[in-house]
Image (cartoon, rainbow, N blue to C red):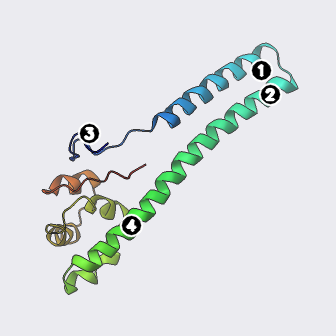
Amino acid sequence: MAGTETKQTFDTHVRRVPNAYAAGTLFALVAIVYALYRVATGPSLDTAAFLLMALALMVAIAFTRTNALRVQDRIIRLETRVRLQQLLPADLQSRIGELSLGQLVSLRFASDAELPALTRRVLDDKLTDRNAIKKLVTDWQADEFRV
């Protein structure tokens, strides 16, 4: 797989919703539209139950995707904090707790060599915009394990 993909950069690092989520969302939307049509043209307990099931399916899909992303963010936060503890000079190690989740997520793409200086800049300049921080990374480290 690594040989078939282009090198990950700031411009190519965004991961789109996996096909399974996209297909599931499309199917759930079709079911909701159809169920709304059935409820409007022939209301019954069965059509109402079908509408509720279609809505529940949409909620389940959204909940599944959201939870996967939250778990991923927690792992990134932990990985980046551990990495910062190993790479930052003592004066910056005490400031790791000042970094927000967004800052940590953005810093994960920086190489070990540039991470200390970039972390100092993010903290000192109070940079919070994820894309702005990512654009400062000069030696991009790909993250191929995202969901």
Residue beneath disc 2: 48
Q: Position of residue 42 (x, y in %)?
A: 82, 15
In the foreground, 127 or 5: 5
In three-dimensional space, the C-alpha distance between marks 2 and 3, rounded to whole angstroms, equals 46 Å
Q: Nearer the viewer, mark 2 or mark 4?
A: 4
Amino acid at dot 4: Arg
Residue beneath disc 1: 39
In three-dimensional space, the C-alpha distance between marks 4 and 3, rounded to whole angstroms, equals 26 Å
141 left or right of 1 in image:
left
Q: Earlier in the sequence, mark 4 or mark 3?
A: 3
Q: Earlier in the sequence, mark 1 or mark 4?
A: 1
In three-dimensional space, the C-alpha distance between marks 1 and 4, rounded to whole angstroms, equals 46 Å
Name the element at disc 2.
helix
Amino acid at dot 1: Val
How many residues crowd mark 2 within 10 Å: few (<14), some (14–19), many (20+)?
Answer: some
Q: Position of residue 1 (x, y in %)?
A: 32, 42
In three-dimensional space, the C-alpha distance between marks 1 and 3, rounded to whole angstroms, equals 47 Å
Looking at the rendered structure, which numbered label has been put on residue 5? 3
Q: Position of residue 11 (x, y in %)?
A: 22, 42
Measured along the vertical axis of the image, is residue 127 above or below residue 135?
below
Q: Nearer the viewer, mark 4 or mark 3?
A: 3
Pointer 2 and pointer 4: residues touching (CB < 8 Å)? no
Looking at the rendered structure, which numbered label has been put on residue 77? 4
